[in-house]
Image: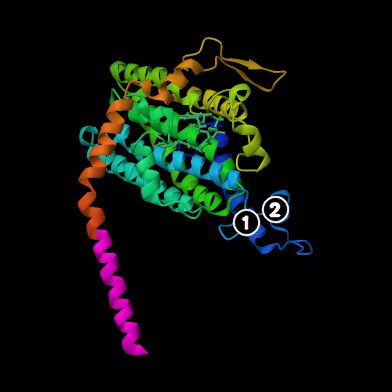
Amino acid sequence: MYGNDFPTDAASSGGELLEQVAAAEAALREAAERTLDSADNAETDYFERIIAADQKIEPRDAMPEAYRRTLIRQIAQHAHSEIIGMQPEGNWITRAPSLKRKAILLAKVQDEAGHGLYLYAAAETLGVSRDELVEKLLSGKQKYSSIFNYPTLTWADVGAIGWLVDGAAIVNQVPLCRSSYGPYARAMIRICKEESFHQRQGFEILYTLARGTPAQREMAQDAVNRWWYPSLAMFGPPDSASVHTAQSMAWKIKRFTNDELRQRFVDMCVEQAKVLGLTLPDPNLRWNPERGSYDFTPPDYDELMRVISGHGPCNQQRMARRRAAHIEGEWVRQAASAYAAKQQQRQRQQEAVAA
Ligand code: BYC
């Protein structure tokens, strides 16, 4: 958990993640100040040396085409996830149980839109336009996270999404703050700082429900039961079936494998579930002293593949809603373009007068 609202040692396991974000931010600044010996500046050699020296590749740098494509794929999928991810929680804005809860949820959903924007902007530095990426999402050529194809059935689901889904997102994304591509790493630092509030609000909702009436407690437990395995699946296929991990690790885009991060998430959640007083729905969850980690039942990877390929419970609904929102937003895009053109024209006129 983040911060000290909850009276337990378990709080420290998540606080460390925010410290890791701060350390990554410091490392980013430090890397920007270090210079490379420029004795040999053949372009590919320069790329390899930047990666080996743990410095950042910037948009102006030459980079292998496959590196550029991998980044576009991953960053675009991530951006789309943030935007589609607004839907399951947005579903509860009108039904939040109090004005305070409604205001918090509104702010959170709005943050997700902001995260999408940071990420589209980072992708654009690689030479694709946001329009192209949005078109690929709408036509189904690019993916978004499997997790957002599950329904939010009760208010407790908003808590479970915050605790588990945002929790998984942070565990996955904190290492991305050290990703080798500068614009992505910088976007991730900002996102992780905001994401930590999201995780905390979800935890707080579940904490409150777990101490409420028996019906509220049951609702909280039911939400955790339904979101646990889909959250584990967010980390992707097992390492043995992950097609991109080895190359992405070699390029330092990814810093840990899917299974390493999944394990880290399980270890963190077990401690936090104790504080909540809720159980994780896995009879095989057991501390393994030899490994220094919890043994657990992996998610159903066949189900993950079905959901990724469009056959999850809400895929059609999510895409239909996104397409409708895109069409409804056409006038906003036109107005923004007209305004930007007018501003540019005005600036040119002012420059001409000044010259
Ligand atoms: N869902 O070789 P692999 C959030 C795909 S936003 C869908 O392991 P990689 C939040 C993968 O793309 C959460 N697809 O790939 C927002 C690949 O397909 P393609 C999103 C998945 O890239 C709002 C294929 O399976 N976070 O948390 O090395 C509110 C093979 O996989 C999934 C990010 O996007 C999945 N779960 O590793 C609240 C983080 N898993 O492209 C919360 C950035 C795998 O070959 N992304 N696939 O057709 C990453 O860290 C990595 O891309 C992944 C996958 C760990 C997701």
- The picture quadrant where one finds residue 206 is top left
* Quadrant that contains the C terminus: bottom left
Which residue is the site of mark 2? 44
Amino acid carrying mark 2 in the image = Thr
**Residue on which disc 1 sits:** 62
Count of marks, rendered view: 2
Q: Pinpoint residue 284: horizontal percent, then vertical percent.
A: 56, 10
Image position of 67 (left or right of 111): right
Q: Are marks 1 and 2 in contact (CB under 8 Å)?
A: yes
Q: Main secondary structure of the magenta part?
A: helix
Query: In the rendered image of this protein, does residue 12 appear above or below residue 290?
Result: below
The first of marks 1 and 2 along the sequence is 2
Q: Is residue 229 visible?
A: no
Q: Residue at x 22, y 44 (%)?
A: 327
Q: What element carries label 1?
A: loop
Q: What stretch is highlighted in magenta?
A: 336-355
Q: Find residue 308 and report its horizontal and vertical position in percent.
A: 43, 25
Identity of the residue furthest to the right in this view:
39
- For the residues marked 1 and 2, what is the alpha-carbon distance in whole angstroms? 7 Å
Residue 269, position as x, y percentages in the image? 52, 26
